[in-house]
């Protein structure tokens, strides 16, 4: 076990470094955790809501013009990734995760993952996100070339992962006001992205990306408070690394339970008006201030902006 400071100066959170096949040790006694309180439930908004504000934007730090075609293996180490997670957790577990091969027979499409770094955030309040998905925060750092190497030999999959990476890069650079299509996230999920709210373009020390709140469903289901999560999808400035961050988040704009929202008697009507329901729900979430979420958007954005990747410089090929 080794303990690592997550910033260059003050000790902010402990990181336990484990090999990919190691068993997670019992958690030691820890100091008091950051305070995270449950947001109050808000009253339903009227049918007609004001349009959401334009996505917030940090100064642009775009990825490299051309995505790298080499370096399919992970050369980055845990020590070369740093961030400030002190507002979210008192303990972060970092490990190198071995590659998972693509299985063409199993869902979801583009499953598997190259060798990557994974940082898991210990929940400061154990039962607060017990019913959420994901139930803990995780930060992933992947080699961009590793995604291409994962689908070598699969023509359609290679085309689609290149398209996915190219679209994210274009999104980061162009920063559109309206995003009509789902923002594909990695690793992929075996469900459909049904909404995107609180969209913002963020810049961290080593690159840029897009953050939003979202939920995934496999059918036309109502959205409960525990279904929402925060995600950031970005790229390092040199185009070598793909950054994916997920964290559970609670919003008072969503009901704690949806058990009585849809019944056998009104199910067909609910499904027929599902697009309107999603639009209203998205607008309600967009209208909430940062402090109305738990954790707050400011706390989550601060962690993303603090991210720094400092790989060894590549050899100069002459």
Image (cartoon, helix red, strand yellow):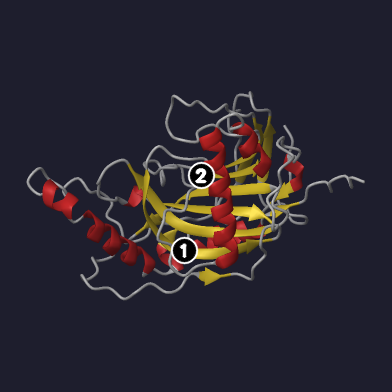
Drawn side of residue 249 relative to residue 221, left or right: right
- Residue 302 location, quadrant: bottom right
Report the number of numbered marks. Answer: 2
Instruction: Estimate the x, y position of residue 54 in percent, counting from the top left.
Output: 45, 73
**Residue shown at 63%/53% (left/top)?**
235
Instruction: Estimate the x, y position of residue 130 in percent, counting from the top left.
Output: 40, 41
Instruction: Estimate the x, y position of residue 133 in percent, counting from the top left.
Output: 41, 42
Q: Which mark is residue 123?
A: 2
Q: Which mark is residue 199?
A: 1
For label 2, the SS is: loop
Report the front residue among 286 and 207. Answer: 207
Give the farthest residue toward the front.
155
**Residue shown at 64%/71% (left/top)?**
59
Mark-to-mark CA distance, 1 and 2: 24 Å
Whether residues under marks 1 and 2 lie with C-beta atoms below 8 angstroms apart, the answer is no
Of circles 1 and 2, the one toward us is 1
Q: Which mark is residue 273?
A: none
**Residue shown at 72%/37% (left/top)?**
74
Specify few, some or many for label 1: CA neighbours under 10 Å numbering under 14, 14-19, or 20 or more: many
Drawn side of residue 280 relative to residue 105, left or right: left
**Residue shown at 10%/42% (left/top)?**
264
For label 1, the SS is: strand
- Residue 174 location, quadrant: bottom right
Drawn side of residue 78 relative to residue 105, left or right: right
Residue 32 seen in render: no
Specify few, some or many for label 2: CA neighbours under 10 Å numbering under 14, 14-19, or 20 or more: many
- Residue 308 location, quadrant: bottom right
**129 w.r.t. 235: above or below:** above
């Amino acid at each position: 076990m080794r303990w690592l400071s997550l910033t260059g100066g003050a000790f902010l959170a402990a990181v336990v470094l484990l090999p990919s096949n190691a068993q997670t040790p019992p958690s030691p006694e820890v100091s008091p955790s950051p305070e995270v309180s449950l947001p109050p439930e808000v009253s339903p908004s009227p049918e007609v809501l004001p349009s959401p504000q334009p996505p917030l934007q940090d100064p642009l730090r775009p990825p490299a013009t051309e995505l790298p075609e080499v370096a399919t293996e992970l050369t980055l180490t845990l020590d070369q990734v740093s961030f400030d997670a002190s507002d979210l957790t008192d303990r972060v577990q970092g490990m190198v995760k071995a590659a998972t091969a693509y299985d063409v027979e199993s869902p979801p499409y583009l499953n598997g993952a190259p060798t990557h770094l994974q940082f898991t955030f210990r929940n400061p309040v154990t039962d607060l996100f017990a019913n959420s998905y994901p139930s803990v925060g995780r930060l992933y750092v992947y080699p961009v070339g590793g995604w291409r190497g994962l689908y070598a030999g699969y023509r359609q999959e290679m085309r689609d992962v290149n398209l996915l990476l190219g679209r994210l890069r274009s999104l980061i650079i162009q920063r559109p006001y309206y995003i009509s299509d789902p923002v594909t996230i990695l690793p992929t999920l075996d469900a459909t992205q049904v909404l995107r709210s609180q969209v913002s373009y963020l810049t961290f020390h080593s690159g840029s990306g897009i953050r939003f709140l979202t939920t995934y469903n496999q059918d036309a289901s109502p959205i409960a408070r525990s279904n929402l999560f925060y995600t950031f999808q970005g790229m390092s400035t040199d185009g070598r690394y793909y950054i994916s961050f997920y964290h559970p988040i609670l919003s008072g704009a969503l009901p704690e339970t949806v058990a009585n929202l849809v019944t056998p008697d009104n199910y067909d009507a609910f499904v027929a008006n599902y697009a309107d329901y999603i639009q209203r729900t998205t607008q309600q979430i967009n209208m909430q201030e940062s402090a109305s979420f738990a954790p707050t958007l400011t706390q989550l954005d601060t962690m993303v902006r603090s991210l720094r990747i400092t790989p060894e410089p590549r050899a100069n090929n002459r």
